[in-house]
Protein backbone atom coordinates (compact mmCIF):
# COMPACT_ATOMS: atom_id res chain seq x y z
CA UNK A 1 0.00 0.00 0.00
CA UNK A 2 1.38 3.37 -0.97
CA UNK A 3 0.73 6.85 0.36
CA UNK A 4 -1.31 8.92 -2.06
CA UNK A 5 0.90 11.86 -3.06
CA UNK A 6 0.54 13.85 -6.26
CA UNK A 7 3.34 16.37 -6.53
CA UNK A 8 2.73 19.63 -8.31
CA UNK A 9 4.81 20.31 -11.40
CA UNK A 10 5.45 23.71 -12.88
CA UNK A 11 3.54 22.61 -15.97
CA UNK A 12 0.44 22.06 -13.81
CA UNK A 13 0.00 25.78 -13.12
CA UNK A 14 -1.96 26.71 -16.31
CA UNK A 15 -4.18 23.66 -15.80
CA UNK A 16 -4.85 24.60 -12.16
CA UNK A 17 -5.72 28.17 -13.14
CA UNK A 18 -8.11 26.83 -15.81
CA UNK A 19 -9.64 24.47 -13.25
CA UNK A 20 -10.22 27.31 -10.78
CA UNK A 21 -11.92 29.35 -13.52
CA UNK A 22 -14.08 26.31 -14.30
CA UNK A 23 -15.10 26.09 -10.63
CA UNK A 24 -16.01 29.79 -10.67
CA UNK A 25 -18.26 29.11 -13.66
CA UNK A 26 -19.83 26.20 -11.77
CA UNK A 27 -20.51 28.63 -8.93
CA UNK A 28 -22.09 31.12 -11.34
CA UNK A 29 -24.29 28.35 -12.70
CA UNK A 30 -26.05 28.19 -9.33
CA UNK A 31 -27.33 31.73 -9.90
CA UNK A 32 -28.39 30.96 -13.45
CA UNK A 33 -30.06 27.73 -12.42
CA UNK A 34 -31.90 29.47 -9.59
CA UNK A 35 -33.32 32.03 -12.02
CA UNK A 36 -34.88 29.43 -14.34
CA UNK A 37 -35.56 26.62 -11.86
CA UNK A 38 -39.33 27.15 -11.94
CA UNK A 39 -39.67 27.84 -15.67
CA UNK A 40 -39.61 24.20 -16.80
CA UNK A 41 -39.82 20.71 -15.26
CA UNK A 42 -36.44 19.61 -13.92
CA UNK A 43 -36.11 16.53 -16.22
CA UNK A 44 -36.76 18.77 -19.25
CA UNK A 45 -34.10 21.26 -18.17
CA UNK A 46 -31.62 18.43 -17.63
CA UNK A 47 -32.33 17.02 -21.10
CA UNK A 48 -31.99 20.40 -22.82
CA UNK A 49 -28.80 21.13 -20.91
CA UNK A 50 -27.08 17.88 -21.85
CA UNK A 51 -28.31 17.97 -25.46
CA UNK A 52 -27.08 21.54 -25.96
CA UNK A 53 -23.79 20.67 -24.25
CA UNK A 54 -23.29 17.82 -26.73
CA UNK A 55 -23.98 20.13 -29.67
CA UNK A 56 -21.71 22.75 -28.12
CA UNK A 57 -18.83 20.29 -28.18
CA UNK A 58 -18.97 19.92 -31.97
CA UNK A 59 -17.54 23.36 -32.92
CA UNK A 60 -14.97 22.97 -30.14
CA UNK A 61 -13.83 19.67 -31.64
CA UNK A 62 -13.74 21.25 -35.11
CA UNK A 63 -11.58 24.17 -33.97
CA UNK A 64 -9.27 21.95 -31.95
CA UNK A 65 -8.80 19.61 -34.91
CA UNK A 66 -8.32 22.44 -37.40
CA UNK A 67 -5.68 24.30 -35.37
CA UNK A 68 -4.22 21.11 -33.84
CA UNK A 69 -4.53 22.41 -30.27
CA UNK A 70 -5.09 18.89 -28.94
CA UNK A 71 -4.37 15.59 -30.62
CA UNK A 72 -7.75 13.90 -30.86
CA UNK A 73 -7.49 10.19 -30.18
CA UNK A 74 -10.11 7.52 -29.67
CA UNK A 75 -10.41 3.76 -29.22
CA UNK A 76 -13.20 1.27 -28.71
CA UNK A 77 -12.38 1.02 -25.01
CA UNK A 78 -13.12 4.74 -24.68
CA UNK A 79 -16.59 4.11 -26.08
CA UNK A 80 -17.14 1.32 -23.57
CA UNK A 81 -16.16 3.64 -20.70
CA UNK A 82 -18.22 6.56 -22.03
CA UNK A 83 -21.47 4.58 -21.89
CA UNK A 84 -21.51 4.01 -18.10
CA UNK A 85 -20.10 7.52 -17.61
CA UNK A 86 -23.05 8.97 -19.54
CA UNK A 87 -25.56 6.95 -17.52
CA UNK A 88 -23.93 8.11 -14.27
CA UNK A 89 -23.90 11.74 -15.44
CA UNK A 90 -27.62 11.60 -16.28
CA UNK A 91 -28.36 9.96 -12.93
CA UNK A 92 -26.36 12.62 -11.09
CA UNK A 93 -28.39 15.42 -12.69
CA UNK A 94 -31.69 13.75 -11.83
CA UNK A 95 -30.65 13.18 -8.19
CA UNK A 96 -29.41 16.75 -7.86
CA UNK A 97 -32.69 18.25 -9.10
CA UNK A 98 -34.71 15.89 -6.90
CA UNK A 99 -32.66 17.18 -3.98
CA UNK A 100 -33.36 20.78 -4.96
CA UNK A 101 -37.08 20.00 -4.91
CA UNK A 102 -37.21 18.22 -1.52
CA UNK A 103 -33.98 19.04 0.33
CA UNK A 104 -32.55 21.94 2.27
CA UNK A 105 -33.90 25.19 0.83
CA UNK A 106 -31.44 27.22 -1.20
CA UNK A 107 -28.19 25.93 0.26
CA UNK A 108 -28.79 22.20 -0.04
CA UNK A 109 -26.61 21.90 -3.14
CA UNK A 110 -23.59 22.65 -0.97
CA UNK A 111 -23.99 19.17 0.49
CA UNK A 112 -22.93 17.86 -2.93
CA UNK A 113 -19.88 20.08 -3.38
CA UNK A 114 -18.59 19.69 0.18
CA UNK A 115 -19.02 15.92 0.46
CA UNK A 116 -17.94 15.01 -3.09
CA UNK A 117 -14.15 15.41 -2.58
CA UNK A 118 -14.44 13.31 0.59
CA UNK A 119 -16.27 10.53 -1.28
CA UNK A 120 -13.75 10.69 -4.14
CA UNK A 121 -10.79 10.29 -1.78
CA UNK A 122 -12.51 7.39 0.03
CA UNK A 123 -13.34 5.57 -3.22
CA UNK A 124 -9.82 6.13 -4.58
CA UNK A 125 -8.42 4.73 -1.34
CA UNK A 126 -10.63 1.64 -1.49
CA UNK A 127 -10.28 0.93 -5.21
CA UNK A 128 -6.63 1.91 -5.73
CA UNK A 129 -5.30 0.81 -2.30
CA UNK A 130 -3.92 4.25 -1.51
CA UNK A 131 -3.58 6.02 1.81
CA UNK A 132 -4.27 9.70 2.38
CA UNK A 133 -1.47 11.97 3.59
CA UNK A 134 -2.07 13.80 6.89
CA UNK A 135 -2.12 17.19 5.19
CA UNK A 136 -4.73 15.98 2.71
CA UNK A 137 -6.86 14.48 5.49
CA UNK A 138 -6.74 17.81 7.31
CA UNK A 139 -7.76 19.54 4.07
CA UNK A 140 -10.78 17.25 3.68
CA UNK A 141 -11.87 17.97 7.26
CA UNK A 142 -11.50 21.71 6.71
CA UNK A 143 -13.43 21.57 3.44
CA UNK A 144 -16.29 19.61 4.98
CA UNK A 145 -16.36 21.92 8.00
CA UNK A 146 -16.35 24.95 5.71
CA UNK A 147 -19.34 23.60 3.82
CA UNK A 148 -21.29 23.07 7.04
CA UNK A 149 -20.44 26.63 8.06
CA UNK A 150 -21.66 28.00 4.72
CA UNK A 151 -25.05 26.30 4.99
CA UNK A 152 -25.12 27.26 8.69
CA UNK A 153 -26.16 23.74 9.58
CA UNK A 154 -26.96 24.66 13.20
CA UNK A 155 -30.00 26.61 11.97
CA UNK A 156 -31.74 23.43 10.76
CA UNK A 157 -33.58 21.03 13.02
CA UNK A 158 -33.20 17.25 12.95
CA UNK A 159 -36.26 16.74 10.72
CA UNK A 160 -34.86 19.10 8.06
CA UNK A 161 -31.45 17.43 8.10
CA UNK A 162 -33.00 13.97 7.76
CA UNK A 163 -35.35 15.05 4.95
CA UNK A 164 -35.57 12.74 1.93
CA UNK A 165 -34.28 15.47 -0.36
CA UNK A 166 -31.00 15.65 1.49
CA UNK A 167 -30.50 11.94 0.88
CA UNK A 168 -30.78 12.76 -2.84
CA UNK A 169 -27.95 15.28 -2.44
CA UNK A 170 -25.73 12.73 -0.73
CA UNK A 171 -26.48 10.14 -3.45
CA UNK A 172 -25.74 12.79 -6.10
CA UNK A 173 -22.40 13.52 -4.43
CA UNK A 174 -21.49 9.84 -4.32
CA UNK A 175 -22.59 9.47 -7.95
CA UNK A 176 -20.31 12.31 -9.07
CA UNK A 177 -17.41 10.73 -7.17
CA UNK A 178 -17.98 7.49 -9.10
CA UNK A 179 -18.20 9.47 -12.35
CA UNK A 180 -14.88 11.16 -11.57
CA UNK A 181 -13.14 7.79 -11.21
CA UNK A 182 -14.85 6.27 -14.26
CA UNK A 183 -13.94 9.23 -16.46
CA UNK A 184 -10.34 9.08 -15.26
CA UNK A 185 -10.17 5.50 -16.54
CA UNK A 186 -12.00 6.35 -19.77
CA UNK A 187 -9.67 9.19 -20.71
CA UNK A 188 -6.82 6.70 -20.79
CA UNK A 189 -8.19 5.56 -24.14
CA UNK A 190 -9.30 8.90 -25.64
CA UNK A 191 -8.54 12.57 -25.28
CA UNK A 192 -10.75 14.40 -22.80
CA UNK A 193 -12.69 16.29 -25.51
CA UNK A 194 -13.85 13.24 -27.47
CA UNK A 195 -14.55 11.31 -24.29
CA UNK A 196 -16.59 14.20 -22.86
CA UNK A 197 -18.58 14.49 -26.09
CA UNK A 198 -19.43 10.78 -26.09
CA UNK A 199 -20.34 10.94 -22.41
CA UNK A 200 -22.62 13.97 -22.88
CA UNK A 201 -24.30 12.29 -25.87
CA UNK A 202 -25.00 9.14 -23.89
CA UNK A 203 -26.28 11.19 -20.94
CA UNK A 204 -28.59 13.06 -23.34
CA UNK A 205 -30.20 9.82 -24.52
CA UNK A 206 -30.68 8.61 -20.95
CA UNK A 207 -32.05 11.94 -19.72
CA UNK A 208 -34.57 11.99 -22.59
CA UNK A 209 -36.11 8.91 -21.02
CA UNK A 210 -36.72 10.89 -17.81
CA UNK A 211 -38.17 13.86 -19.75
CA UNK A 212 -40.21 11.87 -22.28
CA UNK A 213 -43.57 12.38 -20.55
CA UNK A 214 -43.14 16.17 -20.92
CA UNK A 215 -42.59 15.94 -24.72
CA UNK A 216 -39.43 18.11 -24.63
CA UNK A 217 -38.88 18.10 -28.41
CA UNK A 218 -42.36 19.36 -29.29
CA UNK A 219 -42.72 21.92 -26.49
CA UNK A 220 -39.50 23.89 -26.98
CA UNK A 221 -41.30 27.00 -28.25
CA UNK A 222 -43.29 27.41 -25.05
CA UNK A 223 -40.21 28.55 -23.10
CA UNK A 224 -39.13 32.20 -23.07
CA UNK A 225 -35.97 33.69 -24.54
CA UNK A 226 -34.87 34.40 -20.94
CA UNK A 227 -34.95 30.65 -20.27
CA UNK A 228 -32.97 29.80 -23.40
CA UNK A 229 -30.34 32.48 -22.75
CA UNK A 230 -29.59 30.89 -19.39
CA UNK A 231 -29.72 27.43 -20.92
CA UNK A 232 -26.98 28.43 -23.38
CA UNK A 233 -24.82 29.52 -20.45
CA UNK A 234 -25.62 26.43 -18.36
CA UNK A 235 -24.98 24.02 -21.23
CA UNK A 236 -22.35 25.44 -23.58
CA UNK A 237 -20.31 27.52 -21.12
CA UNK A 238 -20.73 25.51 -17.92
CA UNK A 239 -20.87 21.95 -19.30
CA UNK A 240 -19.18 22.02 -22.73
CA UNK A 241 -16.32 24.24 -21.53
CA UNK A 242 -16.06 24.27 -17.73
CA UNK A 243 -17.01 20.63 -17.09
CA UNK A 244 -14.75 19.45 -19.92
CA UNK A 245 -11.90 21.37 -18.28
CA UNK A 246 -12.66 19.45 -15.09
CA UNK A 247 -12.31 16.16 -16.96
CA UNK A 248 -9.05 17.38 -18.48
CA UNK A 249 -7.75 18.12 -14.98
CA UNK A 250 -9.06 14.75 -13.88
CA UNK A 251 -6.99 13.13 -16.62
CA UNK A 252 -3.83 15.09 -15.88
CA UNK A 253 -3.92 15.64 -12.09
CA UNK A 254 -5.80 12.55 -10.95
CA UNK A 255 -9.29 12.16 -9.53
CA UNK A 256 -8.52 13.15 -5.95
CA UNK A 257 -6.64 16.37 -6.70
CA UNK A 258 -9.12 17.52 -9.35
CA UNK A 259 -12.14 16.80 -7.13
CA UNK A 260 -10.62 18.82 -4.27
CA UNK A 261 -11.10 21.99 -6.32
CA UNK A 262 -14.87 21.44 -6.05
CA UNK A 263 -14.51 23.00 -2.58
CA UNK A 264 -14.12 26.30 -4.49
CA UNK A 265 -17.65 26.02 -5.94
CA UNK A 266 -19.75 26.81 -2.84
CA UNK A 267 -17.42 29.65 -1.89
CA UNK A 268 -17.71 31.22 -5.35
CA UNK A 269 -21.46 30.55 -5.48
CA UNK A 270 -22.09 32.29 -2.17
CA UNK A 271 -19.87 35.23 -3.11
CA UNK A 272 -21.50 35.66 -6.53
CA UNK A 273 -24.98 35.27 -5.05
CA UNK A 274 -24.23 37.95 -2.47
CA UNK A 275 -23.12 40.26 -5.28
CA UNK A 276 -25.89 39.48 -7.78
CA UNK A 277 -28.84 39.31 -5.37
CA UNK A 278 -27.42 41.92 -2.95
CA UNK A 279 -27.60 39.35 -0.17
CA UNK A 280 -25.65 40.07 3.03
CA UNK A 281 -22.62 37.80 3.48
CA UNK A 282 -22.64 36.61 7.09
CA UNK A 283 -19.54 35.93 9.18
CA UNK A 284 -20.13 32.12 9.34
CA UNK A 285 -20.49 31.95 5.54
CA UNK A 286 -17.29 33.98 5.04
CA UNK A 287 -15.42 31.76 7.52
CA UNK A 288 -16.73 28.64 5.78
CA UNK A 289 -15.55 29.92 2.40
CA UNK A 290 -12.10 30.64 3.85
CA UNK A 291 -11.90 27.13 5.31
CA UNK A 292 -12.88 25.64 1.94
CA UNK A 293 -10.13 27.57 0.14
CA UNK A 294 -7.60 26.49 2.78
CA UNK A 295 -8.70 22.91 2.16
CA UNK A 296 -7.88 23.18 -1.55
CA UNK A 297 -4.44 24.57 -0.72
CA UNK A 298 -3.63 21.82 1.79
CA UNK A 299 -4.78 18.98 -0.47
CA UNK A 300 -2.80 20.28 -3.45
CA UNK A 301 0.27 21.61 -1.64
CA UNK A 302 3.33 19.93 -3.13
CA UNK A 303 4.76 19.23 0.34
CA UNK A 304 1.82 16.92 1.06
Image (spheres, grey):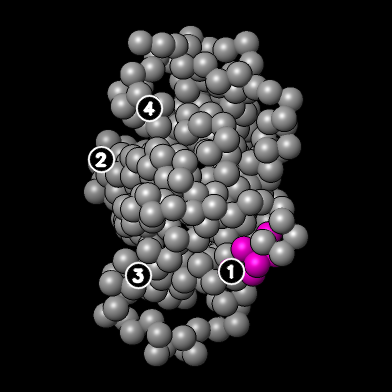
Q: Nearer the viewer, residue 128 or 157?
A: 128
Would you name the residue on which mark 4 appears?
124
Q: Secondary structure at mark 1?
A: helix
Of marks 1 and 2, the one in the foreground: 1
Label 1 to label 2, Cα distance in Å? 43 Å
133 left or right, relative to 14: left
Q: Residue at x 37, y 27 (%)?
A: 124
Label 4 to label 1, Cα distance in Å? 32 Å
Q: Position of residue 63 (x, y in %)?
A: 70, 64
Quadrant of image for the C terminus: top right
Would you name the residue on which mark 3 appears?
205
Q: Secondary structure at mark 4?
A: helix
Q: Is residue 254 above or below residue 222?
A: above
3 left or right, relative to 215: right
Disc on the earlier residue, 4 or 2: 4
Disc on the earlier residue, 1 or 2: 1
Disc on the earlier residue, 3 or 4: 4
Membership of 60 in magenta stretch: yes
Q: Is residue 254 above or below residue 134?
A: below
Label 3 to label 4, Cα distance in Å? 29 Å
Would you name the residue on which mark 1 appears?
58
Q: Residue at x 30, y 23 (%)?
A: 126
Disc on the earlier residue, 3 or 2: 2
Magenta span covers which residues? 58-64
Label 4 to label 2, Cα distance in Å? 27 Å
The mark found on residue 162 in the picture is: 2
Disc on the earlier residue, 1 or 3: 1
Q: Position of residue 262 (x, y in %)?
A: 53, 38
Q: Secondary structure at mark 2?
A: loop
Membership of 236 in magenta stretch: no
Amino acid sequence: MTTYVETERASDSPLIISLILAMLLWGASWISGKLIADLAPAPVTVFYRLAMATLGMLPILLLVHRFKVVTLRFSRKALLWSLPAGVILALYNQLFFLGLHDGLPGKGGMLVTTTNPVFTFILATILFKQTIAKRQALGLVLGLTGGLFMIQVWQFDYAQLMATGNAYFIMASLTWAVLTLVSQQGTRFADFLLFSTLMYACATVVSYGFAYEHSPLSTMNQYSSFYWQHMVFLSVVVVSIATSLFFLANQQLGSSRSSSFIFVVPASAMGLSAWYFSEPLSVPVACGALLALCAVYLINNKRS
